[in-house]
Image: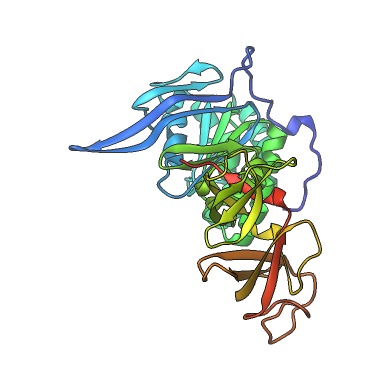
Amino acid sequence: MASTTERSPRTRPPDPGRDADGAPAIALEHVAKTYRTGRRAVTAVRSLDLAVTPGEYFALLGPSGCGKTTTLRLIAGFEEPTAGTVRLAGRDVTGVPPNRRDVNTVFQNYALFPHMTVADNVAFGLRRRRVPTAEIRRRVGDILDLVELTGAADRRPARLSGGQQQRVALARALVNRPGALLLDEPLGALDPVLRHTMRAELKRVQREVGVTFVHVTHDQGEALAMADRLAVMADGELRQTGAPAEVYERPADRFVAGFVGAANLLTGTVRAAADADGYALVGLDGGPQVRAATTAAPGTRVDLTVRPEKIRISAVEPDTAADRLRGTVRDTVYQGPVTQYTVVVAGTGGATELVVHRQNAGVPAAGTERTEPGSPARGDEVWLAWPPRHAHVLGRP
């Protein structure tokens, strides 16, 4: 989809109405959902509190079975909570059926009518609401222009690519001008290249229409690239909510650190209290010591993480104020933009390994394991170093 030029106001659906008192577009208050089969009870969502701001692109991120899709269905009205309250724009909609909630949903399989044209698929909801024909024609034309499918109005879904079908489903949901749009793994059926393209397209459309989007995904890259804010879920609970950079750089616990991006997860004991710069000395299990920002008292057990791209790897000891560890390269994996090194840290008896990502700035040497001249190879002795601000202490359950 080539064009991202500014459109005239006529092609954009009007901004959704916002509550005069500034209420969240979507609010879940102590919401829980338990399924019962005979005597067996399975809790999918546990006393969840969540508020989504009007006009926000919000992502619910987590592994399969964490409760994110159930949460989306509770907002849509396809499921009723066992406990708690669901509000849309300040209105309590708990118990209100889906067709009376001011939200629309886009599913992973798009659910297009194969016997209808693109235009008829998009117009379906408007016709059911008995919108005048002239108004339907205008609104369908406007929304197809917005998603760049004007020339495909008379085609049937079978003649469209996966990305085009996804945009038809998006247009059909938006043409009704909902207060919020719910997207359940909307890019999951696309190939990786198209999925990457459609991230930008979904975000562009959301910015243009100004509708609140709630996007459910297990793909951390999707959530980080698209969301204004995201919530990480596990075992039916919210583990952390915040801007993508905040969640990535300062994960709340080991689960978030390990799920959102690659992470080195380390455990140690505070050996000396924080200095004037706020950094305490932490002895890692196995012997080496590093600095990390924490107010924990000496003797306290702590978990910390250092992201692989924050670590510098070199054959000579760095002449910097960074923390440094000695180690041996156990493995190297060429990944295109970066090479991943797995380094066994010296003095730990092989118990501690760190993963390092090094930017591939040069041309790989053909037929070798090295990405460029001077790069470490398997078996090399190396130094690892990072500024202490990149060692983030995690919360413990």
Q: Quick one: which residue is furthest to the left in this view? A: 39
In the rendered image of this protein, does residue 275 appear above or below residue 387? above
Residue 153 showing in the rendered view: no
In the rendered image of this protein, does residue 222 appear above or below residue 144? below
Q: Where is residue 39? Give x, y as percent.
A: 18, 37
Please tell me which residue is depicted at 61% across the width and 64% down the height of the picture.
355
Please tell me which residue is depicted at 36% across the width and 32% down the height of the picture.
33
Q: 157 left or right of 313?
A: left
Q: Where is residue 166? Give x, y as percent.
A: 57, 48
Q: Which of the two residues, 213 or 291, is positioned nearer the viewer here?
A: 291
* Colouring convention used in this rendered image of the protein: rainbow
Q: In which quarter of the image is residue 358?
A: bottom right
Number of marks present in the image shown? 0
In the rendered image of this protein, does residue 352 appear above or below residue 103? below
Q: Where is residue 365? Give x, y as percent.
A: 75, 83
Q: Quadrant of residue 333?
A: bottom right
Q: 74 left or right of 268?
A: left
In the rendered image of this protein, does residue 388 appear above or below residue 48? below
Residue 192 showing in the rendered view: yes
Q: Quadrant of residue 344?
A: bottom right
Q: Which of the two residues, 224 or 148, is positioned nearer the viewer here?
A: 224
Q: Where is residue 165? Give x, y as percent.
A: 57, 50
Q: Quick one: which residue is furthest to the bottom in this view? A: 367
Q: Which of the two residues, 23 or 300, is positioned nearer the viewer here?
A: 300
Q: 397 left or right of 21?
A: left
Q: 239 left or right of 242?
A: left
Please tell me which residue is depicted at 71% across the width and 32% down the height of the picture.
12
Q: Which of the two residues, 315 or 94, is positioned nearer the viewer here?
A: 315
Please tell me which residue is depicted at 45% across the width and 20% down the height of the picture.
93
